[in-house]
Amino acid sequence: MAPIVVSLGNPLLDIQVPPKEGPAYLEKYGLKSNDAILAEEKHMPIYDDIVANATVDYVAGGAAQNAARGAAYILPAGSVAYIGSVGEDDLKQTLLSANEAEGVQSAYQTQPAPARTGACAVILSNHDRSLCTTLRAAEMFTPDHLATPEISQLLNGAKYFYIEGFFLTHGIESALEVAKKASSSGKTVILNLSAPFIPQFFKVQLEELLPHVDILIGNESEAEAYREAAGMGDADLAQVASTLAAMPKSNASRPRLVVITQGADSTLVASSSASGAAGNLKTSDPNPKTYPVPALSADKIVDTNGAGDMFAGGFLGALALGKSLDECIEIGHKLGQQCCGQIGPKLVFPKVQV
Ligand code: 26A
């Protein structure tokens, strides 16, 4: 079966430090307990440091790669492919195995040595996670990969395109190429804001891509960062979501949805038009609409790393199955919660019915 979902992002191996040991590393490297950043010079020793001195877990990561595995969880075998750039090393092998085990086709661009696959130090404390990333080979992705026969066939055959906001730090040209082509062919483009620093420091790239985006997904801190970057004063999240939904759109035949998650609190969906079209809010729904999140007791939470990606992956998979918006949100919530019960951005295997 040719993949109908293609996901694009930075392939990373997550190196996780458990909550007991996490706070010391937050302090040592000046990291916030709940954040996602690109490592600066002063953070660079963290990778060797935690590997040598902490009890680490290695898990497949990379925001869009996690979402790809989430979508694959609920779609028929062979439905999902993932594109990103890696090095020729053991980290790549770990990522390949995770994708293969979970039904994601890895359509990697591989950089020659000495380039190494990217890594993310995941410092846990309580239910928070601090992500500190060194992109390495991931930011060496070049648009010519998209033109190779294998990848262009993949792009032509797919119907749903998922792009992580993180990719915009280096890959706006490729992201635009994928999104423009997809949206001009009436296909669906989904963008995740990924982290507060994307609307904060990459607002130009974000707004360049946004016209080609049908569904924008983010969390409350990313929406707040956009509010600030856009000078929206004390607008509430519903206003921020509605503003983003109403921004110019190249494929005017379909409304834009903006989905804002708020952890354990309700999820918000704003639409550029409450027309009742397929996959949109119903005409009778409020716009924005608030979806309650089922309760998850604290003792069921192992760590929250990847929960947002698995929400997005569940949403994406359900969308590709032709489910209603309400069902997409419900499945997103289920996979997000499932992920909270696992170490890292993982789901439950053998698979459980969602
Ligand atoms: C460019 N940056 C900072 C990143 C990331 C990232 N994925 C792509 N680019 N920083 C952290 N992640 C991934 O986010 C997941 C949790 O949402 C981590 O690898 C982690 O699995």
Image: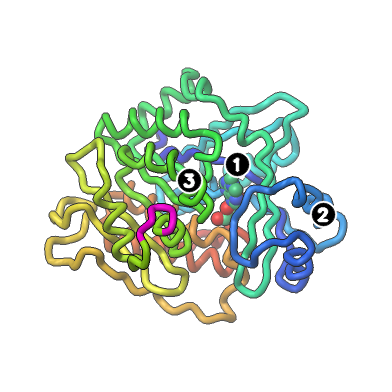
Residue 11: which numbered mark, if any? Answer: 1
Residue 160 image point, x, y percent: 35, 40
Apparent side of residue 320 relative to residue 123 in the rendered image (left or right): left
Q: Which residue is mark 3?
A: 165
Most foreground residue, 323 or 241: 241
Please name the residue shown 73% across and 30% down the image. 115
Apparent side of residue 250 relative to residue 262 in the rendered image (left or right): left
Label 2 CB sits under 8 Å from any ligand 1 atom: no
Q: CA distance from mark 1 to mark 2?
A: 19 Å
Label 1 CB sits under 8 Å from any ligand 1 atom: no
Q: CA distance from mark 1 to mark 3?
A: 13 Å
Residue 176 image point, x, y percent: 40, 32
Q: Quadrant of residue 346?
A: bottom right
Task: Name the residue type under label 2.
Answer: Val
Q: Which residue is mark 2?
A: 51
Bounds of the magenta segment: 228-232
Please name the residue shown 26% across and 30% down the image. 185
Secondary structure beneath dot 2 equals helix
Give the mark nearer the N terminus: 1 vs 2. Answer: 1
Quadrant where the image shows the C terminus: bottom left
Task: Name the residue type under label 1.
Answer: Pro
Q: Quadrant of residue 223?
A: bottom left
Task: Name the residue type under label 3.
Answer: Gly
Residue 133 image point, x, y percent: 66, 48
How many residues crowd mark 2 within 10 Å: few (<14), some (14–19), many (20+)? some
Most foreground residue, 200 or 326: 200
